[in-house]
Image (cartoon, rainbow, N blue to C red):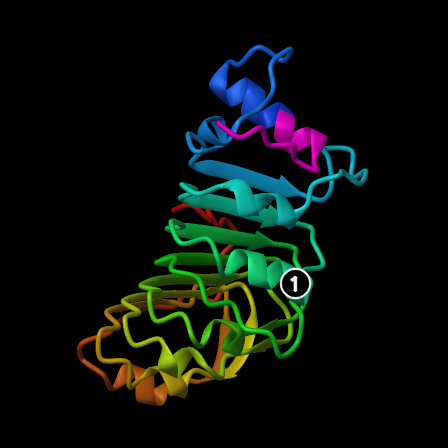
Amino acid sequence: MVEIELKSKELTEHIYLTLNKDRSTPIYDVDIDKIEDVTLDALDFLDEPTDTTIFDLVFFNNLKTCMIANMNISEKEIEVLNKLDSIESIQFTNCVFPKGKKINMHASYVIVDGCVEFDASIFSDMKSITRLRVVNCEHVKLAGLESLSELTELYLQNMELDNIDNISGLDKLEYVNLNGTKVKKLSDLLKNPKIKVDHEEKNYIFDVEG
């Protein structure tokens, strides 16, 4: 066993609680290997900064689900995320992404929620994505979505878009949800009989896990 010292005290506490582990004992690599779900939030419930850092994720070899919130993500932190081989789903809430650096994880389910600026090309190399939710975001650029060849479900909710014609050619796409979103041009997408489109411009209630 190898003793692991995490940078984040909050994440350390999460491990002790999750494993019901005696706090007088160190955390070892075999302990962290038991953790499959982690939330990293740069703010606590009082909106005060925490010591949470993405760099701690290098120790999580069996992580399947991760939520990252309220972070200005650096290029080096993207490199850490790209090494999470076991990840299945990831959510980014109120995050800022670096320009020009792409995320290339193996996750099949990705959620982007409440990010002021979102450029979908950051995920253009993620051929593993089958479900993508982009919700409550502003200044959204969708270029790059057309390369997500395995995408079957796409949620673009509570925002304004010029058009989404670049996704109409995705062969495996089966469902698009545009509830709460104003789209200036939908014609090409609606002509595709293989794709079911839900589109209610008013969407007052949105459950990100729905």
- The residue at the point 40 percent across, 54 percent down is 85
> Can residue 4 be found in the magenta stretch?
yes
- Horizontal placement of 101 versus 189: left or right? right
* Range shown magenta: 1-12
- The residue at the point 40 percent across, 70 percent down is 126
- Horizontal placement of 3 versus 164: left or right? right
Main SS, magenta region, reads loop
Q: Position of residue 78 (x, y in %)?
A: 59, 62
Q: Quadrant of residue 36?
A: top left
Q: Residue furthest front?
A: 1
Q: Residues within 10 Å of mark 1 (few under 14, many from 20)?
A: few
Residue on which disc 1 sits: 76
Look at the numbered disc 1 and give the secondary structure of its residue.
Answer: helix
- Horizontal placement of 84 versus 130: left or right? right
- The residue at the point 63 percent across, 13 percent down is 23
User: What's under tag 1, amino acid-wise?
Assistant: Lys
The answer to whether residue 114 is visible is yes
Q: Position of residue 33 (x, y in %)?
A: 43, 33
Taking depth in this image into account, of 25 and 188 the one nearest to the observer is 25
